[in-house]
């Protein structure tokens, strides 16, 4: 399940950089949960051909992430905002100070 989530995130960030054909195959496999056989039949290509294209797309999307780190930065920011939300529920001065530190760190990173 974690691999599908990661693949979907990579696709969300970098999917537009794939060709139309690659996007269609990858969406059907990752997002629409079609089997390789279903995609192959729909596209009129072999199951192995679909498998090879999906692997190629995975490699391409992971390559973009290795260079750009957008998903990594998104995940870190999401974690920081979650922590801010948790701390905001607390009413003490230390929590407010921590919230300001986290918020400033987010702003510095961007």
Image (tube, helix red, strand yellow):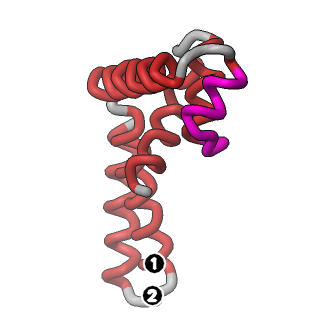
Marking on residue 78:
none
Image quadrant occupied by the N terminus: bottom left
Indicate the position of residue 28 as horizontal and vertical percent values.
64, 33
Q: Quadrant of residue 57?
A: top left
**Residue position marked by numbered label 1 in the rendering:** 86
Q: Where is the C terminus found, in terms of image quarters?
A: top left
For image coordinates 33% across by 31% down, the residue present is: 69
Q: What residue lies at 53% left-to-right and 15% top-to-bottom?
A: 17
- Dominant SS in magenta: helix
Q: Residue at x 32, y 61 (%)?
A: 101
Q: Which residues are magenta?
A: 31-42
- For label 2, the residue is 90
Label 1 neighbour load within 10 Å: few <14, some 14-19, many 20+? few
Q: Is residue 92 above or below residue 12?
A: below
Q: Between residues 104 and 53, which one lies in front from this camera angle?
A: 53
Element under label 2?
A: loop
* Occupied quadrant, residue 100: bottom left
Q: Nearer the viewer, mark 1 or mark 2?
A: 1
Which percent across, then down, holds residue 44? Answer: 67, 15
The residue closer to the viewer here, 108 or 83, is: 83
Residue 4, compared with residue 96, is above or below; it is above
Q: Residue at x 45, y 21 (%)?
A: 48
**Residue at the left extreme?**
66
Can the viewer see residue 68 in this picture? no
Q: Nearer the viewer, residue 46 or 29?
A: 46
Q: Are marks 1 and 2 in contact (CB under 8 Å)?
A: yes
User: Which residue is at the far right?
Assistant: 42
- Residue 6, image x and y in percent? 42, 45
């Amino acid at each position: 399940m974690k691999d599908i989530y990661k693949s979907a995130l990579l696709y969300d960030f970098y999917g537009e950089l794939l060709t139309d054909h690659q996007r269609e195959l990858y969406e059907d496999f990752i997002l629409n949960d079609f089997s390789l056989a279903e995609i192959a039949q729909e596209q009129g290509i072999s199951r192995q051909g679909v498998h090879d294209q999906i692997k190629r797309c995975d490699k391409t999307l992971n390559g973009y992430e290795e260079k750009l780190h957008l998903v990594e930065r998104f995940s870190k920011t999401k974690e920081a905002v979650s922590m801010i939300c948790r701390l905001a529920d607390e009413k003490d001065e230390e929590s407010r100070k921590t919230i300001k530190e986290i918020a400033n760190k987010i702003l510095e990173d961007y």
